[in-house]
Amino acid sequence: MLQDQIKQLIQARTNTDGLTETGIPGVQLFRATQAMPCAPAVYEPSIVAIASGSKEAVLEGKRFLYDNRKYLCCPMSMPVQAGTPAASQENPLYGVYISLDPGMMSRLAIEMENAGALRPRATNTSETHGIRLATWDFEFSEALLRLLKLLGNETDMALLGQTRLHEVYYAILKGEAGLFARQAFGIGNAIARSIAHVSANLDSPISIDDLATRAGLSRAVFHRKFKQVTAMSPIQFVKTMRINNAAMKISEGMTVSEAALDVGYISPSQFSREFKRTYGQSPRQWSDAQQGQIATP
């Protein structure tokens, strides 16, 4: 099976838990051999494909459990909780994390429309809030395998890496999450542009009125459309993005005060109060609980 070959390629190139760079920009491998409960994280535009084991993501109370039957597609930055609750030495998790380049995805989506490509039939519409699970179909598996077969050969990666990555993107846009991804990367998606602006400007004041104006929508319409896409109000989304980004910085060794200021909080004490309301622990207590754990995407 193609997935068995994919697993073998990942296995051969991951000697430790955590992320492993491949040499192809935007493509990382990862391994986990210990269970990790769900913790605050931010998924940037990406897909996460699990070749062996399973992974979990939670967005606004909705749980997404995925393995070698479904991959996760996240076309917009999303604040989630993520973990590997079933990973162990006996049942290690192996996977691939691929960043989705907005420019390349948009160009592909437009070219597919211009070429008269049929839109995939929408399924599982209850999963359309921010992230979606999609079936590992043959085209996706084959494109991913062809990409990973380049690893280890510097010349192949330099000359063919972007072309093979382009094939993976195309398989995603044609697959079960294709319509969902096209809606995010297609022309005129005001909410996706707003989310990209929030993600890039967390350290600056963010006005909901300004976001609505940028989107060309009234505040009321912007609020309704934003919640349809993310399952969160704009204010809640900004707050959760800030808290989760700060949590990731704290887990990497930054102090609570530095992390709070780095994501736009003027008062570290306000950040600590909001963090505790969200996750039931102070940032310091949460940080202490994370020691010794190795993050995967």
Image (cartoon, grey):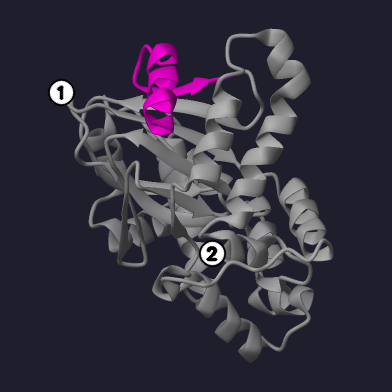
Apparent side of residue 192 relative to residue 62 in the rendered image (left or right): right
Name, please, the residue furthest toward the left.
90
Apparent side of residue 93 relative to residue 135 in the rendered image (left or right): left
- Dot placed on the residue nearer the N-terminal end, 1 or 2: 1
Identify whether 158 is placed above or below 129: above
> Which amino acid, mark 1?
Glu
Q: Position of residue 171 (x, y in %)?
A: 61, 47
> Which residue corresponds to the image point at 30% horizontal and 67% vertical from the top-left?
61
Q: Quadrant of the C terminus?
A: top left
Circle 2 is placed at which residue position?
A: 238
Q: Position of residue 99 (x, y in %)?
A: 60, 40
> Which residue corresponds to the image point at 38% horizontal and 38% vertical from the top-left?
50
Q: Position of residue 92 (x, y in %)?
A: 25, 26
Task: Let me know if residue 191 is in the magenta part.
Answer: no
> Which residue corresponds to the image point at 46% horizontal and 73% vertical from the top-left?
232
Viewer-nearest residue: 147 or 88: 147
> Which residue corresponds to the image point at 52% horizontal and 79% vertical from the top-left?
228
Q: Quadrant of the N terminus?
A: top left
Number of numbered discs: 2
Magenta part of the chain? 1-22
User: Label for residue 90?
Assistant: 1
Viewer-nearest residue: 248 or 165: 165
Mark 1: which secondary structure?
loop
Quadrant hosting residue 60: bottom left
Task: Let me know if residue 10 is in the magenta part.
Answer: yes
